[in-house]
Image (cartoon, rainbow, N blue to C red):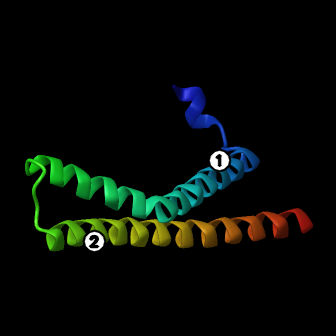
Amino acid sequence: MEMFIDQKPDKKQTYTGVMVVLVLLFVLGLVLVLTSATIGLSTASAELAKNGGSMDMTMYQYIMSNTAESYRIVGAILAIITGVGALMAGFAGYKQKQA
């Protein structure tokens, strides 16, 4: 355990790990945005099945659109934040190589 405490973190390995996490979260955000309509539809269908196959059409539409919108917003926020973070980290890595 002490040998890990005494070691200095490898900057290149840390940078690579951060970039991988940022890119994966960016892709996850894009997937959420692109599949939000499908998620909304499946959620509304599941609620319809829970109610024994009968539901007010307005309620079905409400569940479908709000669920899709929620996933779309979360995915967009995730993609924007991690995309900007990846760009900033990439720029910092580029500047560090130049120095």
- Closer to the chain start, of discs 2 and 1, is 1
In percent of the image, x 28 and y 66: which residue is there? 64
Residue 48, position in %: x, y? 16, 54
Which part of the image, by quadrant, shows the C terminus? bottom right
In percent of the image, x 24 and y 70: which residue is there? 61
Q: Is residue 99 left or right of residue 21?
A: right
Q: Is residue 80 left or right of residue 46?
A: right
Residue to which mark 2 is pinned: 66
Q: Is residue 18 left or right of residue 38?
A: right
Q: Is residue 7 above or below residue 41?
A: above
Q: Is residue 64 above or below residue 25?
A: below
Numbered label tally: 2
Residue to which mark 1 is pinned: 17
The kind of residue tagged 1 is Gly
Residue 68, position in %: x, y? 35, 67
Residue 70, position in %: x, y? 33, 69
Q: Is residue 71 above or below residue 43?
A: below
Crowdedness near tag 1: few (<14), some (14–19) or many (≥20) residues, C-alpha within 10 Å: few
In percent of the image, x 21 and y 72: which residue is there? 62
Disc 1 is placed on an element classified as helix
- Place residue 87 in its image quadrant: bottom right
Q: Is residue 75 left or right of residue 87?
A: left
Instruction: State the residue lying farthest toward the right.
Output: 98
Q: Nearer the viewer, residue 53 or 50?
A: 53
Residue 81, position in %: x, y? 53, 71
The kind of residue tagged 2 is Asn
- Place residue 27 in its image quadrant: bottom right
Point out which mark residue 28 bears. Answer: none
In percent of the image, x 33 and y 59: which residue is there? 41
